[in-house]
Amino acid sequence: MKNKQVLLASRPQGTVEESHFRIVESDIPKAGDNEFVVRNHYLSLDPYMRGRMDNEKSYAAKAEVGAVMVGTAVGEVIESKHEKFNPGDFVETRTGWQEYGVSNGGGVRKLDPNYVPLSAYLGVVGMPGVTAWIGLNEHGKPKAGETVVVSAASGAVGSAVGQLAKLKGCRAVGIAGGKAKCDYVVNELGFDACIDYKAVDLNAALAAACPKGVDVYFDNVGGPTLDALLLHMNNFSRIALCGQIAGYNDPGALALHNARSFLVNRIALRGFICSDHLDLWRPALKELGDLVHEGRLKYRESIAMGLDNAPKAFIGLLAGKNFGKQLVKLI
Amino acid sequence: MKNKQVLLASRPQGTVEESHFRIVESDIPKAGDNEFVVRNHYLSLDPYMRGRMDNEKSYAAKAEVGAVMVGTAVGEVIESKHEKFNPGDFVETRTGWQEYGVSNGGGVRKLDPNYVPLSAYLGVVGMPGVTAWIGLNEHGKPKAGETVVVSAASGAVGSAVGQLAKLKGCRAVGIAGGKAKCDYVVNELGFDACIDYKAVDLNAALAAACPKGVDVYFDNVGGPTLDALLLHMNNFSRIALCGQIAGYNDPGALALHNARSFLVNRIALRGFICSDHLDLWRPALKELGDLVHEGRLKYRESIAMGLDNAPKAFIGLLAGKNFGKQLVKLI
């Protein structure tokens, strides 16, 4: 038995390709004092990982060339010399893109796979769900009757944003790519409308879907989508900016031409990432877990099988080919 | 005796010219029931007036073609049928660009020209001062030791922003056009540094003047200046956006190419105008008046003589030819 790992082979200039990764095998690690070994069941793939492949300053430490790609996984403890973790415990760790990892327990969350499915702790009851919760509640502050728009609406973050907005009595409008995603967002998740940005003129579609303008825009993509939204924001509206996937391959694509709107409409825009608000994780995860357990918060997963397929699945995620939370199933 | 008035003759497409105004004479008005007549001593000229000349949606009602240009003035009541105002009272009214006006008392502020000079109520102890106070305190929220940058630093708003920041123990850095303005900002107002954007590379100058980055940017101009600042903002920094003079003649000039910084640095940007916060005017004016009275808050005025010169002075203001608060002296 070996431990398969995905290393960062080189930093991409622009589009990510499989050649930027290298798959290797090493021995399964042993636990040292105050450590445990986890066998990962699911690896999470997230857009933020693209930023970590670059050498530029971003909001998180970069991945190192030649090292295991950074990332979060859920799995089962199989060996432990740590007093707080025992074999059989289910945990979320930041052991990265590999089948087995060692942890000293720092930043590790214990999971109950009987309350919600294990994989959900990487999605709607994990970082993406908390991101949705914080951006909507802390920055968006929607009131009942207001209109909330979210981009990447069928994704792990966006699907939670719209459903949480609906639970608050808001009009929820999604933006997604393709009819299948838009149908899912409206018919399965219960959004009031979803705009297929690949098929229509975004500006005209926003006017039609948001007859009373936009009070909260939760932005996962930046660039031309954010720029279009600026023309539809109401006075004293809020923009929670947590993703700029439009600029991953070309920062110039993030340019905003409608900046006049910031002043005319007295807009409050705020960039944030979920780790800026560690104090809110506990209440957010409690609410999200309860809502999933009760069947009031739905989610969807795209599951790639086996670590060998992680690079390809990640490249697909950046191109919007996933449908819901992108995971890699390892066992 | 006649009442001289400046009317909006036509809406400018781009640059404002004197031909967009028309000067007329009419009879001095009479007070009706619950009204008074004011003889204006000073008319205030402010950048926001440019926006009111357009037909587009902005943050304030537009001026009408053929009507007296909108604006605020200070003067003395000369006739009254209003129980709260008597001849000899000094007042601030929104009677516009004319020598005499009629008011029903709505939105009128009584002034004490013995506490601070009458003209100061149109500047640092008036709307521009309140704008500085609100943007800095409500949105900027500077802490001692932080770096505060303000554009149009020698102007009515900017000069107050930097001085208030200094009183809070911050490093204050101005941006202004020309050596005379920059010298004034540093030597007279006590800013730590001032960048002459006409003479240097703004990006390099910001790096030199803000060795610890920028925590608060108070933006009066928008466009390329704001875009340059985005490259120098610290994590969790704040941008208070209250002017976009860079885009008055060409909204395309407001484009932002460095929008990536909003997320990377978790920036909070907020567009605001002082009338968004009417609850804060009383405490702001109290503090500003006391500081001026005590000689701890300085200001400078550019005074055009006579209403005939108002259009020319306004055009100069938009071109940055004023030096401090731009006024027109009418008496």
Image (cartoon, coloured by chain):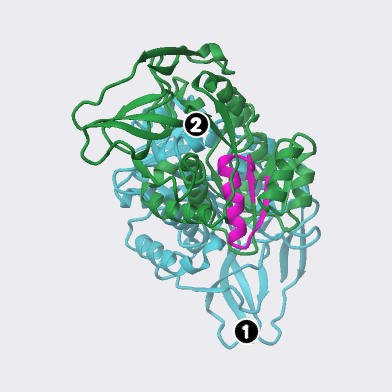
Chain colours: A green, B cyan
Residue B145 in percent (x, y) is at: 29, 43
Q: Chain of mark 1?
A: B
Q: Which residue appears at 53% of the width and 57% of the height?
A: A294
In the image, taking residue B189 as reference, residue A173 lies left or right, namely: right
Graded by Cα atoms within 10 Å as few (under 14), some (14 to 19) or many (20 or more), the crowding at tag 2 reads some
* Quarter occupied by residue A319: top right
Q: Residue furthest left?
A: A33
Q: Amino acid at mark 2?
A: Tyr
Nearest-to-viewer mark from 1 and 2: 2
Q: Is residue B18 above or below residue A48?
A: below
Badge 1 marks a residue whose secondary structure is strand
Q: Which residue appears at 59% of the width and 42% of the height?
A: A219
Residue B147 in percent (x, y) is at: 36, 41
Q: Which quadrant of the figure contains the N terminus of chain A?
A: top left
Badge 2 marks a residue whose secondary structure is helix
Graded by Cα atoms within 10 Å as few (under 14), some (14 to 19) or many (20 or more), the crowding at tag 1 reads many
Mark 1 lies on residue = B80
Q: Which of these two is toward me, A18 or A219?
A: A18
Q: Is residue B167 above or below residue A78?
A: below
Query: For the magenta stretch, what is the residue range?
Result: A149-174
Mark 2 lies on residue = A48
Q: Which of these two is toward me, B17 or B238?
A: B238
In the image, taking residue B56 as reference, residue B329 lies left or right, namely: left
Structural distance between the alpha carbons of marks 1 and 2: 67 Å
Residue A322 in percent (x, y) is at: 63, 32
